[in-house]
């Protein structure tokens, strides 16, 4: 697991492949995808027309409502690394990209149109606008360029499933806030809307609870870690440990920051906090909660 998450490029490919294979209707449509667009997941309807719209160096994004402006700010941050200078405007006539809120069949549905007039993304709510922007970004070249060509398209799309989630286990392998946010960015890029945050287990407790300080003083750390995959060893005599203390936790302020970061990207965080099972790390701090006498310590094995 640790090796996988240290390779973001490989992770992105696996995440995208899993998304496609989990949606049979979309996977069956792969053969009909217009050549070279590389859209993941494949939208329900994709029409490609003759022509290319070239985004200028300086781009204006039309946005008026709160949701439109939130998505516009996110899109601005994603376009600037491609070498663009981006500003928001309330004048739709001068904008190259227009975010428009109108009634659509579904809460997360969107329409993306690229033609000689520019780019327009229409949706009934912020989530749809955001997903339309992600599809638009997939149409752009990956490298910065003075002029960026986008094919003329008309795309209609709506997620096939309401719950589109992925899990990150920070109990066994702790990841800093910066990485968690990058993980959320990956999910957002492929239109996932749920982040399953696995915060506690036998191997470590990762969330600050001010009423129970020992959870972060004791339960958040283990004295060492088993080397290798436990299921490959025949007996405990074969176990070898790294003799290195390991741990960490998120403060309540960090948790709030990550929740807000995810919300802006239309992702709901579902925390996994396990009780009474998988709670040996908790018993290391509060052994009086155990059914049988301790002492206990945060697990150094995988279990």
Image (cartoon, helix red, strand yellow):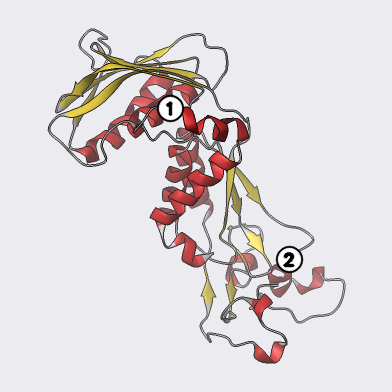
Residue 175 visible here? no
Which callout, 2 or 1, points at the residue further toward the start of the chain? 1
| Residue 299 percent coordinates (x, y) | 67, 76
| Residue at the image position 39 percent from the left and 27 percent from the top | 34
The residue under label 2 is 279
Within 10 Å of the Cα at label 1, are there few (<14), some (14-19), or many (20+) other Cα atoms? many
Q: Is residue 285 left or right of residue 102?
A: right
| Residue at the image position 56 percent from the left and 60 percent from the top | 170
Q: Nearer the viewer, residue 271 or 283?
A: 271
Q: What is the tally of numbered marks visible in this picture?
A: 2
| Residue 256 percent coordinates (x, y) | 51, 45
| Residue 18 percent coordinates (x, y) | 55, 46
Is 19 located above or below residue 283 in the figure? above
Separation of residues labelled 2 and 1 (CA atoms) = 38 Å
* Quarter of the image where the C terminus is located: bottom right
Q: Is residue 41 left or right of residue 194?
A: left
| Residue 255 percent coordinates (x, y) | 52, 49
The residue under label 1 is 130
Q: Is residue 159 left or right of residue 120?
A: right
Q: Residue furthest bottom?
A: 237
The numbered disc on residue 275 is none
* Quarter of the image where the N terminus is located: bottom right
- Which dot, 2 or 1, sits closer to the camera? 1
């Amino acid at each position: 697991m640790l090796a996988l998450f240290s390779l973001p490029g490989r992770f992105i490919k696996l995440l995208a492949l899993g998304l496609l294979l989990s949606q049979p209707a979309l996977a069956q449509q792969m053969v009909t995808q217009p050549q070279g667009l590389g859209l993941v997941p494949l939208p329900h309807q994709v029409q490609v027309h003759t022509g290319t719209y070239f985004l200028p160096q300086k781009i204006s994004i039309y946005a008026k409502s709160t949701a439109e402006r939130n998505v516009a700010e996110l899109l601005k941050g994603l376009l600037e690394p491609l070498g663009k200078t981006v500003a928001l405007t309330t004048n739709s006539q001068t904008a190259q990209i227009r975010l428009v809120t109108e009634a659509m069949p579904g809460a997360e549905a969107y329409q993306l149109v690229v033609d000689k007039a520019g780019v327009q993304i229409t949706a009934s709510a912020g989530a749809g606008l955001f997903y339309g922007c992600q599809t638009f970004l997939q149409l752009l070249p990956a490298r910065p360029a003075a002029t960026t060509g986008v094919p003329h398209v008309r795309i209609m799309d709506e997620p096939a499933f309401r719950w589109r989630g992925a899990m990150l286990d920070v109990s066994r392998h702790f990841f800093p806030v910066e990485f968690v946010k990058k993980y959320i960015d990956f999910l957002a890029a492929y239109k996932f809307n749920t982040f399953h945050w696995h915060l506690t287990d036998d191997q470590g407790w990762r969330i600050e609870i001010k009423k129970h300080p020992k959870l972060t003083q004791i339960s958040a750390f283990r004295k060492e870690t088993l080397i290798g995959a436990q299921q490959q060893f025949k007996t405990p005599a074969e176990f070898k440990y790294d003799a290195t203390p390991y741990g960490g936790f998120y403060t309540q302020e960090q948790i709030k920051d990550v929740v807000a970061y995810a919300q802006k990207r239309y992702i709901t965080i579902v925390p996994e906090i396990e009780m009474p099972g998988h709670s040996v790390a908790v018993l290391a701090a509060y052994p009086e909660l155990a059914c049988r006498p301790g002492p206990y310590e945060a697990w150094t094995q995988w279990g």
